[in-house]
Image: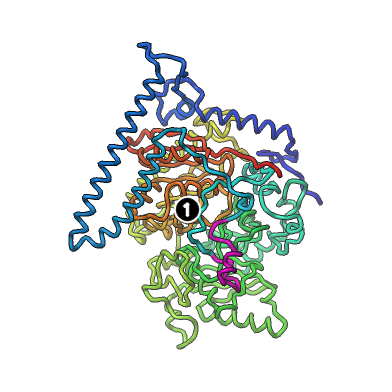
Amino acid sequence: MSSMPLQRGISGGVRVSDSADDLRDSQMKDKTDLIRGRSTTDSSSLTLRFPFAFLFTNNTQSPSKTGDNGSDPRSRHRLVLLFLKISLVLIVVLALAGSFWWTLSISASPRGGHVYHNYRRLQEQLVSDLLDIGEISIGPSRWKELEYCDVEAENYVPCFNVSESLEMGYTNGDENDRFCGSGSKQECLVLPPVDYKVPLRWPTGKDVIWFRNVKITANEVLTSGSINKRMMMMDDDQISFRSASPMFDEVEDYSHQIAQMIGIKNDNFIEAGVRTILDIGCGYGSFGAHLLSKQLLTMCIANYEASGSQVQLTLERGLPAMIASFVSKQLPYPSLSFDMLHCSTCGIDWDQKDGLLLVEVDRVLKPGGYFVWTSPLTNARNKEDLKRWNFVHDFAESICWTLLSQQDKTVVWKKTIKTKCYSARKPGVGPSVCSKGHDVESPYYRPLQMCLGGTRSRRWIPIEGRTRWPSRSNMNKTELSLYGLHQEVVGEDAENWKVNVREYWSLLSPLIFSDHPKRPGDEDPSPPYNMLRNVLDMNAQYGGLNSALLEAKKSVWVMNVVPTAGPNHLPMILDRGFVGVLHDWCEAFPSYPRTYDLVHADNLLTLQTSKLRSSCSFMQIFTEIDRLLRPEGWVIIRDTAQLVEAARALTTQLKWEARVIEVESSSEQRLLVCQKPITKRQSI
């Protein structure tokens, strides 16, 4: 049974023709012309409240025109540039002279050793940034656009080079782990594959993706093994995950089976306290796609795969996913993060390493949460497989899991809600409870630990005892006190983000919908005409952007990233029913190229410059944003006016279209709104 191809943004069965592609190219040209600001409207009276006119305004005059006094504008322009250059040189000299004097004064002090050591690191980064600014100040003629990466980088993810890991001596699965060295940073722009097409808009794109957008062979599609993977069909240039497929019934039946094993009627997982699920080795996201209708949010994780990647295809469908693995390091989530962990023929040998991998499952599972495992091993018949199954069964019991049910190849365990269970065990049975020094909320790729984490946390609350979704996303005063936060602070933050989201939508919609005209501020067209789906928030703070988008009924999901350089509010974000991860933005993000429609950074540049860091520059962070961003994708940076102007200068090297926009509610901050153009690789 062949699948029926679909057109962008239309749920009917009409193939996208060449003429449609030509129309899109024409529309993209129009949009590019618009964002460059080819209007002659006077910008002095424009503010963020009237973004449509502001974005398309351009006050530049033709070089052939003269001023009122008849002088040549070119001469005035050169004089202004000369004055700016001289002023910049004086500022740099004074800044360096003052900094060196302060350095000498604190280094002479007996208590200044530690300060001096840290200041030297800041000074080195300052000199580097000043040199960059000096290069920019010379003029546009000296700005150098970055080169494009080789074709091998098309689907490459830095920090995940299996061949290099094997050369370093890592084997037995450890070669799939994450290793970020100095050579993992890219200083080039990743081009999309030949014949790349902008993904179909949500929700059409959930069921149909372009074959050329992902690295997968026809054989990998046809030989996919699990139920989740078999829900794929190929037809020329498209891969279909058809809801009309008989395999869909298998996934629905599988969901019913799990619900019955837990004791839930009508698949109402929310009633049992389940909202967030970590799907280990998720196939291509079909289980999570099905659970969306149940208001469940499923995060897919799997190893880096050079071809046929589960994570890449899941993200291409507009579903949450990231590269992560149960190998030798802890996942970048705090303890007690998810309501359920699911593993359906996920390829992990849970009996290996003396049960260490099951201890990591226990760490990220909330009290009363569920571990669902589907594997032929649970129905073992031969002696060797029976031995392996008995080990997993006994180890689960030793860490206070209760076996709820076993049907066919599926087993469901429930984590204990009582910490007393650990002290009630017989001596020598199961791993011990982690000490306070080993039980931290910021486990950024630390080695796996053979101890039970989260038992001392104030967040040790059974999932049935938590507020149900969607009320869970708006925490009350008592709940916020668990994280040391005041309701007034979080409430004010939430109100600000409601305003910001309305502003963002008003800014983007006239451009994105240039092929679907509507006035700024109008309601979005009904599905499938949704503007964005995958959103990356680089500095999520309390998860305010995520909450505001959901409250505004936008059909998006947000990857809430909490930088390791700032305060860690990730436990609160996860407890609100969102998904997120810890990350150091001086390293590559664990995702494939071209996976996000919108990248948002609120005060991230301020955060990076406020820390004594010298491991990366702004340009390295921006090239990483470019790698993660889809062609025709958008970037919104909100920061101080000075840092936004510095960032805008870098966008020229990245070949982005960019505009700086004043924020009406703040004289100190600016918005930098950018779009990444679609640059097609020429066929060889």
Closer to the camera, 340 or 208? 208
**Residue for point 23% across, 46% down:** 98
Q: Which element type, helix, strand or loop, lies under badge 1?
A: strand
Position of residue 343 measured from the top left corner of the image (x, y, whole percent): 61, 67
> Which residue is at a point 70% across and 79% down the rendered structure image?
380
| Residue type of the residue flagged with mark 1 | Asn
Residue at label 1? 560
Q: Residue at x 50, y 78 (%)?
A: 400
Q: Identify the magenta region.
A: 157-177
Residue 97 image offset from top left, x and y in percent = 24, 45
Residue 673 locus on image (x, y percent):
47, 37
| Location of residue 232 by image quarter | bottom right
The C terminus appears in which quarter of the rendering? top right
Q: Identify whether 160 is placed above or below 678.
A: below
Examine the structure image and report whether residue 565 is included in the region drawn in magenta: no
Is residue 293 something that shows in the picture?
Answer: no
Determine crowd level at label 1: few under 14, some 14-19, many 20+ residues with C-alpha closer than 10 A.
many
